[in-house]
Image: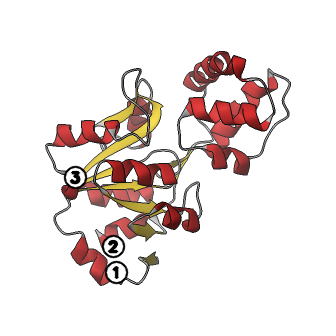
Amino acid sequence: YEIQLGDWSSDVCSSDLTGIKGLIFDLDGTLVDTAPQIRDLCNSVMADLGAPPVNTALVMSMLGEGPKRLIEKLFVYHHLPLDKVEETLAVYRWRYDRSQGDKEKIYPGMKEALKKLKDRFLLAVNTNKPESIAPGMMEDFFPGIFSPVVGETQTRRRKPSSDGVKVILNAWNLKPDEVLYIGDTAVDILTGHAAGLKVIGVTWGFREERVLIEAGADYIFHHPLDLCKNL
């Protein structure tokens, strides 16, 4: 599995990342491919407003800033007035909470990678999913792997705010230079950097490598097992 670090070699990467004690993961597009499930939910709530269905690629391009921004972007795309965003968001959340998640898939190699990383690092999740559902979802997919699992609340700002990262750093009693952030979108890179963390951009998720580089990713990994090989 290839690792690309601009002009750096993987040996430089290994040396550069000594002293790391914790890894913070994004959820959607990093740990689990949730795009098909989210696409179906989006099409369901937008169909209530008479809008035609959209494809997975379009939904993927809109992900990363939480469900409210996703619904807002869909309204703009369909040229709908924004006065029903909150009502539609409530329906979206209700249906999401009750969806079976049968289309959500763990990325190949991720379980193996996390099992190996758990022996050497603290592992946590920082997501824009509501904190009311994110911990249970992670426990279903990856039992006993992540602590804490931090999501959006009414009092905690969503990514790219560093609020969630700071909650994790405090829980671990670690400094920013002892933790790496791992995610698949520019929002994740901004989130990690806002908290003073270096960020690994991953290309198996919702964004192309070019987008991650332009956003300032410190490292680019192409497969979950790269995490085991280079950390």
| 49 versus 144 height, above or below | above
The Cα atoms of the two marked residues, 1 and 3, are separated by 22 Å
Say how the picture is coloured.
Answer: secondary structure
The amino acid type, in three-letter code, at marker 2 is Lys
Please indicate whether residue 37 sits to the left or right of residue 55 in the image: left
Please indicate whether residue 84 sits to the left or right of residue 69 in the image: right
Mark nearest the camera among 3 and 2 is 3
The amino acid type, in three-letter code, at marker 1 is Ser
Provide residue 138's location: percent of width, then percent of height: 41, 38
Disc 2 marks which residue?
Answer: 229
Q: Residue at x 19, y 69 (%)?
A: 18
> Which of disc 2 and disc 3 is earlier in sequence?
3
Disc 3 marks which residue?
Answer: 176
**Is residue 185 something that shows in the picture?**
no
Provide residue 149's location: percent of width, then percent of height: 34, 36
Q: Nearer the viewer, residue 111 or 67?
A: 67
Could you classify mark 2 by the number of other residues whose Cα lies within 10 Å: few (under 14), some (14-19), or many (20 or more)?
few
In the rendered structure, find residue 10 and report the number of the disc placed on it. 1
The amino acid type, in three-letter code, at marker 3 is Pro
Q: Residue at x 54, y 44 (%)?
A: 64
Splitting the image into 4 quarters, where does residue 90 fall? top right
